[in-house]
Image (cartoon, rainbow, N blue to C red):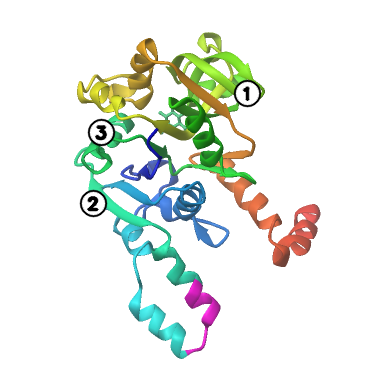
Amino acid sequence: MKRIRKAVIPVAGLGTRFLPATKAQPKEMLPLVDKPLIQYIVEEAVASGIEEIIFVTSSTKRAIEDHFDRAFELEYRLRQKGKKSELDQLQQISNMAKFCYVRQKSPKGLGHAIYTAQPLVGDEPFAVLLGDDIIDAKIPALKQMIAVYQKYGQVVLGCTKVAKSETHKYGIIDPLPVSDRLVKVKRIVEKPRAAQAPSQLAVTGRYVLTPEIFKILAKGRKGAGGEIQLTDALAVYFKNHPGYACVYQGDYYDCGSKLEFIKAIVRFSLKRPEFKKELKKYLKNI
Ligand code: G1P
């Protein structure tokens, strides 16, 4: 079985939900405490064994390329000032993995973004991580999923249970239970209303895919919102191939929603020893 070495991270979206914050900077660079969202995603991938990160970008996303590159002038200044720990932290970012970039020339949907990465992925299984979806877990969510892939050699989706009122925001699976945190996927539906949802198990921006998905995406069939959807390609895939969903252990934050993003900021800040006491006191007071 081939190892999962590469991860595709689509970052071409305009981030309109976060305007005006995203007028002149990518939404992926918004900070969760003091680290951009995208760095959490890359760190999860690297901690799961990924060696090569393929960003699918667009013209307004140069700040992401700069973030994962060296910053010579800043490094020079930090060295001069003797700020060793800041310097080490900065240098680690660009050394985490091999970073590659490909442009999605028009916003045709998530499925199209993944298809754009095909020349860099080649003929091997790969991971996909979406930049809005932050998963706080002891064992990285993707690592839990790769363990399932290593056992079965099939597509694995990362899932969590959401409220009925939330199914319209996610790809929802029709599950066949296998064991405690593992189900087989009978079917997947993109953003169904509660009444049509086959379950409350939502795909939260983590996928382990096989290159067969590219053949389906190549057909370019449009789905929800007139876009080429990854979920629709997976729906076709699951008609002829088995696949699994791992109900990972960890807390999920949908940072594509402002309220969830604010909750994530509070939760992540409370975990920091230097802020915990003061912040708790402050929150109680207000
Ligand atoms: C995308 C996918 C959806 C998935 C979600 C996770 O939707 O299309 O299936 O559940 O990400 O965040 P988006 O959030 O881009 O609308």
- Amino acid type for the residue under numbered disc 1: Ala
> Can see residue 87?
yes
Q: Label 1 vs label 3: CA separation?
A: 31 Å
Residue 240 image position (x, y, % from top left):
35, 11
Residue 126 image position (x, y, % from top left):
37, 37
Establish if 248 lies above or below 84.
Answer: above
Q: Residue at x 43, y 71 (%)?
A: 91
Q: Report the image quarter containing ligand 1.
A: top left
- Rendered image quadrant of residue 34: bottom right
The residue that label 3 is drawn on is 115
Outermost residue, front side: 1
The residue that label 2 is drawn on is 59
Q: Label 1 vs label 2: CA separation?
A: 36 Å
Mark 3 or mark 2, which is nearer to you? Answer: 3
Secondary structure of the residue carrying numbered label 1: loop
- Magenta part of the protein: which range? 81-88
